[in-house]
Image (cartoon, rainbow, N blue to C red):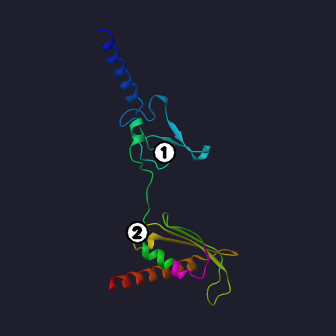
Amino acid sequence: MTVDRPLRVTFILALCLAVAACGGRRSGGPPGGLLGPVTVGSSQDEKTPYSGPPGENPGQYAKSSIWDVFGPNKSDQSVNVNRYIWAATLDVLNFLPVQSVDPFTGIIVTGYGNPPGGGRAYRATVHVRDPALDARSLNVSLHSQGGTVSPATARAVEDAILARARQLRIQDRKL
């Protein structure tokens, strides 16, 4: 009976040390620990060496210990899009049939359609990247049946979308 209790305490302490040793490297020490550099990626040319703490590299494993698995998932990030740019895009490109819309990533993909008064068919892919009403928040890719269109045409569509977004914001402030 007297030997049983210290044996249990020793076993529990050894188990706690084993679990604590499963944790990742927080700071200091050579990159990759005892095993050398660890590579992350799916193919040979996409592999990058792991050399820092979790969260530095977007493609790396973000959990560093067994206890982090039970914490909140930091990889579930929501991307906010500007509602005025989103509505203006759908308003300006209303002549194009919408094929796919993903408001969580801010991507609108349309099919081929003819603009009013034009004879050439276009399709567009629009990416709204930021919640700011800014030109950097919008990326428009236009294609015709003959290939990509000139950058000036894509810029004109971006300008039309941004002008309409500003109009929608001004109308919203008057209410």
**Res. 31 visible in picture:** yes
2 vs 37, left or right, is left
Place residue 68 in its image quadrant: top left
Kindly identify the residue that appears in the image at 51 percent across and 81 percent down.
91
Vertically, is 31 above or below 18? below
Determine the secondary structure under disc 2.
loop
Q: Position of residue 43 (x, y in %)?
A: 61, 45
Kindly identify the residue that appears in the image at 33 percent across and 11 percent down.
4
Q: Position of residue 114 (x, y in %)?
A: 65, 83
| The N terminus sits in image quarter | top left
Q: Position of residue 80 (x, y in %)?
A: 42, 65
Place residue 16 in its image quadrant: top left
Q: Are marks 1 and 2 in contact (CB under 8 Å)?
A: no
Q: Position of residue 89 (x, y in %)?
A: 51, 77
* Badge 1 amino acid: Gln
**Res. 52 visible in picture:** no
| The C terminus sits in image quarter | bottom left
Is 97 included in the stretch rendered in magenta? yes
1 vs 139, left or right, is left
Question: Looking at the image, which residue sits at the far bottom?
Answer: 117
- Using a 10 Å C-alpha cutoff, classify the residue at mark 2 as few (fewer than 14 neighbours), some (14 to 19) or many (20 or more): some
Vertically, is 149 above or below 11? below
41 vs 16, left or right, is right
Place residue 78 in its image quadrant: bottom left
Vertically, is 101 above or below 64? below
Determine the secondary structure under disc 1.
loop
* Residue holding disc 1: 60
* Badge 2 amino acid: Pro
Residue 131: which disc? 2
Cα–Cα gap, marks 1 and 2? 26 Å
Where does the magenta region start and end?
A: 90-98
